Image: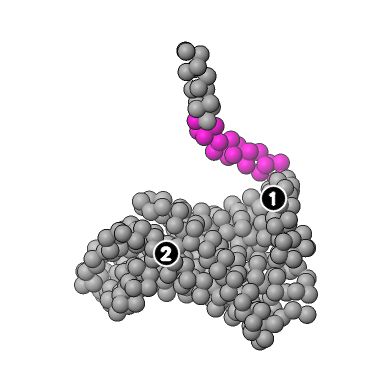
């Protein structure tokens, strides 16, 4: 009998031991790969820094400062009061969630998530409402979709416009579907005349500006770290051929939809890990059926990649919010964006880009 209990406990202890040591093992392996592929990693890190400095800082830092400054005004409360009759029936979130939605659409990843966490910390929404908002308020911005993806990568403004429209449609669709997320929870009762933060005035303007700029810089630097980290990670995965088995599996899945070029599978995998690198590879594949490139790009823009997911995870880490709703929401966002894009490409002659 004692042997039976001893044998039954061994698998449990083995599982706990693996669970406890798996992260240290991954970090050790990552450090080893940094040395092993140091030449390629150095150039990847430089590319990540250039991407961050040339694209992310100019586009996101002003919006982060603006959102921090708006937190010290009553604009958010007035907007929430005005749009509450729309937000509550459609998305089952308070009207103040419209601020996170609008800024998330205008400025891009991860502004929406940062605003949602701020609203939760200020007691302007419940935990369940914040998790619903996380699922659909953190989106890719129009500057990135129209400028970087449409004009720079595809070389076509109409494609950029199509991707932006389907991205927003999918975002709103996810918000409507997530109105049923923990539906029985008690909605928040927000007082739109009060705020936990002191309102800005001429006497405290300097202090408010300093706090807002420092908070914005902290977030942008954190994003830069993720961009560099995932640029290096992609370099390691490519040079070590660790992604090859998954690429072949994905290629078999794509084959069912008539996508026979293996480059789409490998590029899509890169996009799942880090959005910008994947989009650059997908848009560079020469294909007569360019609709394939566009549809896959639509999915990646909706999903955002694991790099953005971990950025959001780091933002919500100090709160009690779960990343589960965000992950499910972004997968749905990617699927719906790809479906809407396919629909427009198929049934609207103006969007027929295939040769």
The vertical placement of 110 against 243, above or below, is: below
* Crowd tier of the residue under label 1, counting other residues whose Cα lies within 10 Å: few below 14, some 14–19, many 20 or above: few
- Badge 1 marks a residue whose secondary structure is helix
Q: Which residue is mark 1?
A: 246
The vertical placement of 347 against 236, above or below, is: below
Whether residue 56 is visible, yes or no, is no
Q: Is residue 35 magenta?
A: yes
N-terminal of the pair, mark 1 or mark 2, is 2
Q: Residue at x 47, y 18 (%)?
A: 5
- Image coords of residue 262 (percent x, y): 77, 59
Whether residue 30 is visible, yes or no, is yes
Mark 1 touches mark 2? (CB < 8 Å): no
Q: For the view shown, which residue lies furthest in the bottom direction?
A: 350
Please say which color scheme the image uses: one colour
Q: Is residue 347 magenta?
A: no
Real-space Cα separation, disc 1 to disc 2, in angstroms = 31 Å
Q: Which residue is mark 2?
A: 178
- Please tell me whether mark 1 or mark 2 is closer to you in this view: 2
Q: Nearer the viewer, residue 212 or 271?
A: 271
Instruction: Give the magenta-colored segment's residue range.
Output: 16-42
Q: Residue at x 23, y 72 (%)?
A: 192
Viewport quadrant of the C terminus: bottom right
- Image coords of residue 214 (percent x, y): 40, 61
Main secondary structure type of the part rendered in magenta: helix
């Amino acid at each position: 009998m004692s042997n039976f209990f001893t044998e039954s406990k061994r698998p449990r202890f083995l599982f706990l031991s693996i669970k406890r040591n798996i992260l240290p093992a991954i970090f050790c392996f990552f450090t080893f790969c940094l040395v092993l592929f140091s030449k390629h990693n150095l150039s990847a890190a430089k590319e990540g820094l250039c991407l961050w400095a040339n694209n992310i800082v100019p586009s996101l830092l002003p919006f982060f400062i603006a959102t921090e400054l708006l937190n010290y005004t009553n604009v958010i409360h007035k907007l929430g009061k005005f749009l509450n009759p729309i937000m509550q029936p459609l998305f089952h979130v308070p009207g103040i969630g419209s601020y996170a939605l609008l800024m998330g659409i205008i400025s891009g990843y991860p502004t929406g998530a940062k605003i949602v966490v701020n609203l939760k910390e200020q007691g302007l929404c419940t935990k369940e409402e914040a998790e619903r908002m996380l699922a659909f308020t953190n989106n890719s911005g129009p500057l990135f979709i129209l400028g970087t993806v449409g004009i720079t990568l595809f070389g076509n403004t109409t494609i950029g416009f199509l991707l932006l429209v389907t991205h927003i449609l999918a975002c709103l669709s996810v918000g409507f579907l997530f109105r049923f997320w923990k539906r029985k929870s008690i909605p928040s009762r927000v007082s739109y005349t009060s705020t936990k933060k002191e309102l800005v005035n001429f006497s405290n303007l300097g202090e408010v500006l300093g706090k807002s700029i420092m908070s914005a810089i902290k977030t942008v630097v954190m994003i830069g770290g993720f961009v560099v980290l995932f640029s290096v990670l992609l370099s390691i995965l490519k040079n070590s051929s660790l992604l090859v088995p998954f690429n072949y599996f994905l290629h078999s899945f794509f084959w069912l939809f008539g996508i026979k070029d293996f480059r789409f599978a490998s590029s899509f995998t890169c996009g799942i890990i880090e959005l910008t690198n994947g989009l650059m590879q997908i848009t560079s594949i020469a294909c007569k059926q360019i609709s394939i490139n566009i549809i896959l790009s639509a999915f990646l823009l909706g999903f955002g990649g694991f790099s953005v997911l971990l950025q959001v995870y780091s933002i919500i880490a100090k709160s009690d919010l779960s990343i589960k709703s965000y992950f499910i929401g972004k997968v749905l966002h990617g699927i719906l964006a790809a479906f809407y894009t396919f629909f427009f490409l198929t049934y609207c002659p103006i969007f027929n880009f295939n040769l």
